[in-house]
Image: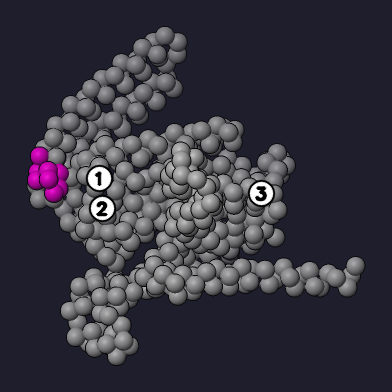
Amino acid sequence: MSLRQPDAAAGGRLRAPLLFAAMAALVAIEAATGGWNTALGIVNMGLISAVLALGVNMQWGYAGLFNTGIVGFLALGGLAPVLIAMPPTPGAFAGGGPGIALAALVALASVIAAIAVNRRLRGRPRAIAIIAILVAGFFAYRALFDRAVAVIQAINPSAQGNLGGLGLPVLLAWPVGALFAAGAAWIIGKTALGLRSDYLAIATLGIGEIIVAVLRNEEWLSRGVMNVNGIPRPWPVPYEVQLQADPAFVSRMAGLGVDPVTGSTIMVKLLYTGLFLVVLLALIWAAQMALKSPWGRMMRAIRDNEIAAAAMGKDVTRRHLQIFVIGSAVCGLAGAMMITLDGQMTPGSYNPLRYTFLIWVMVIVGGSGNNWGSVLGGMLIWYLWIKAEAWGPVLMSFLTAGMAEGALKSHLLDSAAHMRLFTMGLILLLVLRFAPRGLLPEK
């Protein structure tokens, strides 16, 4: 038995490099068959998905916190490029900004007053006073807020109709997106982390949907379903037309035998890949250092046995709040990165199936508690999510080739569009059956 242990240890050490090499091979095959534009597009969104999976893994893999509102933190992060990088709407801040700020102060004052009354009074007078304060505060808030919003949305509604941004570099929006998500996570955590895990899941699910609903309906902030277009690109990523107008770039592409239009899109995607890799590697380094520190060992001890950790003097709720905020901040950072890559914010596209369920599949398949497993799961599941849409109709046409024309064959061919969901469910079942700890289990 002792003679086999070194082989097993060597196999464990080689497992991660082999799996990442297989992932690189899939990307290379995609580049050879579909072109580098398609391959790099998958890689870029795969890197953002890896950042998302890393944030969720911090919450679940480190502390056992079941967050089902990932889409909400992602959407809050996506709001940051709109408010930071977009140019301001002329007259919007002057016309409606003070009214919105005053309405926010009225709402905050109402909440603080209700909390003070709740602490000082007792019985029926307390209930009556709290209701009176909140009702009066609500009507005062709406009167100020609605008037300010009407002014903002009346400014060039076909193209703007929102506050706009500060016109700052878009890279500044990435940490701001993390701060937006962290602030929301702190508010949620202060109220929900004292609950049982199932209640926390319900609370985060509901609050995540509330955040998305606000972004879809508050046109003065995010233009709602009309979307925000033209979000600037980060340094050093240029626009394709700039590269195509550069004689040096055109001559370089001609020397390589590449069409300048194709070469410009590949160059832009390569620069995005470099930016996203820097962010991901920095996060991986920080996460690995934290996981190996006494703080990381304490978090895993709390995850494995909260009662024992509390008996040892650890403040379980405070530590849960800490890791919940950190993980949500990483999700917010990924949301800002994704909006920057897309160049537009479309609140209607924030779908829990795509931005909550799929992220959980990435964490589970990659290996809960393993940072590198989250990266692998993010890249692999995103690749399969994209390719399943293309493979579905081909596979279904092959399976139904020998069937007679009729309702059944038509139904099967029409169902090929749902192959993504079937594929994700099948992968999840296979992993849970044959590798319940994921492809790269926690050590």
Chain-order first, disc 2 or disc 3? 2
Q: Using the image as rendered, state which of residue 115 and residue 341 is in the foreground.
A: 341
Residue 82 - label: 2
- Residue 352 placement (x, y as % from top left): 44, 42
Q: Using the image as rendered, state which of residue 399 and residue 372 is in the foreground.
A: 399
| Circles 2, 1 touching at the beta carbon (< 8 Å) | yes
> Which residue occupies the extreme front position in the image?
404
Q: Residue at x 31, y 21 (%)?
A: 134
Q: Looking at the image, is mark 2 or mark 3 nearer the viewer?
A: 3
Q: Give the image quarter of residue 236.
A: bottom left
| Circles 1, 3 touching at the beta carbon (< 8 Å) | no
Chain-order first, disc 2 or disc 1? 2
Q: Is residue 182 visible?
A: no
172 is higher (above) or lower (below) than 244: above
Q: Residue at x 37, y 59 (%)?
A: 337
Q: Residue at x 69, y 49 (%)?
A: 433
Residue numbers of the magenta segment: 154-161
Q: Indicate the amino acid at tag 3.
A: Leu
- Callout 3 secondary element: helix
**CA–CA distance in space, label 2 to label 1:** 7 Å
**CA–CA distance in space, label 1 to label 3:** 40 Å
**Label 1, on which residue?**
222
- Residue 103 placement (x, y as % from top left): 22, 33
Crowd class of label 1 (few under 14; some 14 to 19; many from 20; radius 10 Å): many
**Label 3, on which residue?**
432
96 is higher (above) or lower (below) than 107: below
Q: Residue at x 52, y 69 (%)?
A: 26
Residue 156 - label: none
Crowd class of label 3 (few under 14; some 14 to 19; many from 20; radius 10 Å): some
Q: Is residue 68 visible?
A: yes
**CA–CA distance in space, label 2 to label 3:** 40 Å
- Quadrant of image for the C terminus: bottom right
